[in-house]
Amino acid sequence: MTNEHMTNDDPTATTPVPAPRPRPSARFGTIFWGVLLLVFAAAMAVTVLPWFSVDPTTLALGACIAAGVLLVVAGIASVIARPKR
């Protein structure tokens, strides 16, 4: 038997599918610095707007509380989205 009559038109032939690569998780440093920069930008935006008069201490306290809540929610979402072992 010769190889000249063989073709790749076999409907039962399957090609191997590569396994999906695991998605890398977000690093804590990236999230921390992103939140810190967002808080700083929001603080600068609020102080520049003329129709707002906010005490800087209250603004800093509110920003810290908002950042803390955001980090806790992101952590919970990360745990829920993580595949079970």
Image (cartoon, grey):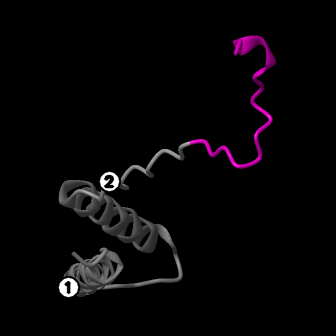
* Residue 70 on image: x %, y %: 31, 81
Q: Nearer the viewer, residue 70 or 39?
A: 70
The first of marks 2 and 1 along the sequence is 2
Residue 52 horizontal side relative to residue 7, left or right = left
Instruction: Give the quadrant of residue 37.
Output: bottom left
**Residue at numbered disc 1:** 61
Task: Give the quarter of the figure containing the C terminus.
Answer: bottom left
In the picture shown, does residue 29 fall above or below 35? above
Task: Give the quarter of the figure containing the N terminus.
Answer: top right
Q: Residue at x 31, y 84 (%)?
A: 80
Q: Residue at x 37, y 55 (%)?
A: 23
Dots 2, 1 in contact, CB < 8 A = no
Q: CA distance from mark 2 to mark 1?
A: 33 Å
Q: Nearer the viewer, residue 80 or 84?
A: 84
Q: Residue at x 29, y 59 (%)?
A: 25
For the residue marked with disc 1, what is the amino acid? Answer: Leu
For the residue marked with disc 2, what is the amino acid? Answer: Pro
* Residue 32 on image: x %, y %: 22, 62
Q: Is residue 19 visible?
A: yes
**Residue at numbered disc 2:** 24
Residue 72 horizontal side relative to residue 24, left or right = left
Residue 21 horizontal side relative to residue 36, left or right = right
Q: What's drawn in magenta, residue-wise?
A: 1-15
Q: Nearer the viewer, residue 34 or 15?
A: 15
- How crowded is the residue under tag 1: few (<14 C-alpha within 10 Å), some, or many (20+)? few
Q: Secondary structure at mark 2?
A: loop
Instruction: Give the quadrant of residue 41.
Output: bottom left
Q: Is residue 56 visible?
A: no
* Residue 11 on image: x %, y %: 77, 47
